[in-house]
Amino acid sequence: MSTAPKRPTVNVLGLGYIGLPTASLLATRGYQVHGVDVSPDVVATINQGDIHIVEPELDVLVRSAVHSGQLTAATEPAPADVFLIAVPTPFKDGKQPDLSYVEAATRSMAQVLEPGNLVILESTSPVGTTERVAEWIAAARPDLSPDTIHIAHCPERVLPGRIIQELVDNDRVVGGLNDAATEAATDFYRAFVSGEVLPTTARTAEMAKLTENTFRDVNIALANELSLICDRLDIDVWRLIELANRHPRVNVLQPGPGVGGHCIAVDPWFIIDSAPEQSQLIRTARTVNDAKPDHVVAQVISRAERLRDPVIACLGLAYKPDVDDLRESPALRITESLAERGVGRILAVEPYAESMPHRLKELGAEWTNLQDAMQEADILVALVAHRPFRNLSAAQVQAKMVVDACGLLKQLG
Ligand code: SAJ
């Protein structure tokens, strides 16, 4: 009689947008998972079967994982077979990568490591970080022979809003510090990922992830630059892109109010930091995208100047459509900037958030629902094409002065 292979036990370090979905997915697949987070509040929330972030299907998954006893959370790591590091890698002032969270997670985990363990860094990281993880482990645990711990990088590549689905469906790039580590990490992912698992080296895996997000940033920069050019030449950029994309080998992305979130606006800097001389195009793309919010603000001001007491409705504060995430959001930045400059009465509309961000409150912006905003506003600033906004009619919107930063108008009937 054959018995099913025993599933490895797993520690997931960092229970945020990547760690928590991964931990709960593994737990519902029968892995015994110990989740670790430095925040006691996050740990307490998860241990009650609740979640502290919004992501479709995540609540059900976490509840089931916790109630079955397969997922527990704590502030300290525990012995296990596999350690997944999924902590943030932001940048510091001066756009240099901040690896302090990876280092802290590695050092805390090093205390419980045993020979034969597999350590996987999932956090998006500059090239060479996986090697540094090995150095930090060696420094913390000189008693362990470096060859007995398998260390690999497998960058997360899931899209917020579709995380649960993409965790399983997406292909994964896995690079170990040596062949044995690559093989051990590849086997680990193949057991629960239905996409292809592609082996490579740690450095290539690190660069692959940075390349993916940089590809997107550079192409969005092209779209954003086209939007400026079209403003100047009095051309509808949305129609222009639609037409250009009818060429079989052209796929221009969409212009927007700027590039937000914790990934695409950050990761290209990791490449620029590693090879500044060679990264001219990547740097310029970042500059173009970072300048876009100011351009939108200027467009609003030029319309507001034509009115005596302008009422300006900012539609959407999130960093992209149909998410509640306001982190690094150009829409939020634009709304704040308008409120700061006293351009007029600012109505903030964000159907996915429960209350107005503190800073906007301080600046005197008014938290308004879509209906009231449509009644009161003279100027509509379409910042995020959220689903509820797409139910507006084109006639309703066009009756106002409109700054359409996200192409909402073209999506209306
Ligand atoms: N955006 C545009 N125009 C577009 C597409 C996006 O202006 O045509 C803007 C969005 O409005 C948003 C920003 O770019 O402000 C980023 O949004 P996104 O949906 O492109 O990506 P993220 O940041 O939510 O997730 C990305 C994904 N990377 C790629 O698609 C290459 C995801 O797969 C990564 O896992 C994630 O970064 C990450 O964590 O690195």
Image (tube, helix red, strand yellow):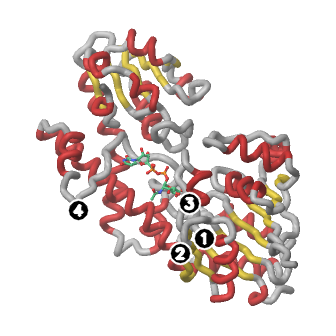
Query: What is the spatial separation of the Cα atoms under label 1 and label 3, in whole angstroms?
Result: 15 Å
Kindly state the secondary structure of the residue where label 1 is placed. Answer: loop
Q: Identify the residue at image location x=43%, y=24%.
A: 339
Labels 3, 2: front one: 3
Labels 4, 2: front one: 4
Q: Which residue is disc 4 drawn over?
A: 249
Q: Are marks 4 and 2 in contact (CB under 8 Å)?
A: no
Labels 3, 4: front one: 3
Which numbered disc, 3 or 2, marks the residue that appears first in the sequence?
3
Q: Amino acid at mark 3?
A: Asp
Residue 172 in view (yes/no): yes
On-image quarter of the C terminus: top left
- Which residue occupies the foreground of this view, 61 or 160? 61
Kindly state the secondary structure of the residue where label 2 is placed. Answer: helix
For the view shown, which residue lies furthest in the front direction? 1
Q: Relative to residue 36, is residue 376 depicted above or below?
A: above
Q: Which residue is disc 1 drawn over?
A: 154
Which numbered disc, 1 or 3, marks the residue that appears first in the sequence?
1
Q: Relative to residue 395, is residue 10 depicted above or below?
A: below
